[in-house]
Amino acid sequence: MLAKLAKAISNQAFRTRFGQMMLRLGINATRHRVFAPRTAALMEFDLARLKARAKHPANGAQITAPYDQLHFGCGARRIPGWLNVDVSNSDYDVDLASDLPWRDGQFSAIVAQQVIEHLELQSELLPLLRELRRVSKTGAEIWLSCPDMGRVCQSYGDDKGQGLVDDWLTRYRGPAPVADMPSQHMINYLFHQSGEHRNLLDADLLTWALMNSGFAECQQVGEEQLLQRFPEFPPRRDGRYSLYMRASVSL
């Protein structure tokens, strides 16, 4: 009973701007007294997920999507002609690890880049993949990318992660996450990313997850194949450490 009451209060709070401000102030007020910065950041992410659920309450998956191509976990990368979805500031905010609001068989293509590693495998990622399978049309394709467990581990054996540091510096402005620390810490960063990454996957593990969720014809690909198929996506140039997979919904 208390848990239901607390959930009801939280959901109602997120329906008002004042409630959202007070909850954020509560976290910030204790950030330096009780919670470690990583804990506070994770709490803020969970509150964003709660806000998305309160903004669009579950209603039996009765929504018809305005586009038949889903860009899942879009961040700031908006792709014209796609439904760009994330936990906040998107075309349609959703909790990335909850039931999806769309009707069955809505999408002919789904792309999610550097998203699935943020979800715990059993309790979040597998249910999400099953939901993505549900909202996919027959013959639809799904393209996923994430840090590649095998390549990250191999980089440690090859050069103690220095290649990953060099790759980072070619793609981003400013210092790498390791700063002035030994390059080995880049391995830690990719596995954990300050607590944001819940798991890394390799081709075998991601294939198993996709097949277990109802997808078929799983194939390891590269970013170049994704860009050939959907040239409207801007390149990430993250093939040095990333795994790209394509799967489909059987006819």
Image: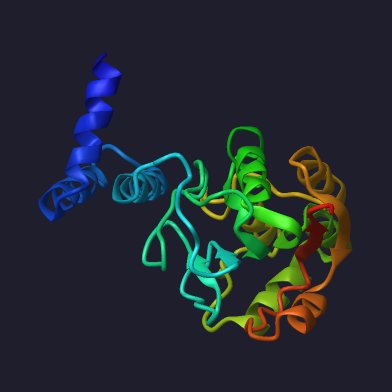
Q: Residue at x 60, y 64 (%)?
A: 181
Residue situated in front as seen by the camera: 32 or 246: 246
On screen, residue 59 above or below 170: above
Residue 246 shows in the view: yes
Q: Residue furthest top?
A: 1
Residue situated in front as seen by the camera: 193 or 232: 232
On screen, residue 88 above or below 117: below
Residue 223 appears left or right of 91: right
Q: Position of residue 226 (x, y in %)?
A: 76, 75
Q: Position of residue 17 (x, y in %)?
A: 14, 55
Residue 182 shows in the view: no
Q: Residue furthest left?
A: 18
On screen, residue 78 above or below 92: below
Q: Residue at x 60, y 48 (%)?
A: 104
Q: Position of residue 154 (x, y in %)?
A: 86, 58
State which quarter of the image contains the N terminus. Answer: top left
Q: Position of residue 194 (x, y in %)?
A: 51, 52
The picture quadrant where one finds residue 248 is bottom right
Q: Residue at x 69, y 72 (%)?
A: 165
The picture quadrant where one finds residue 178 is bottom right
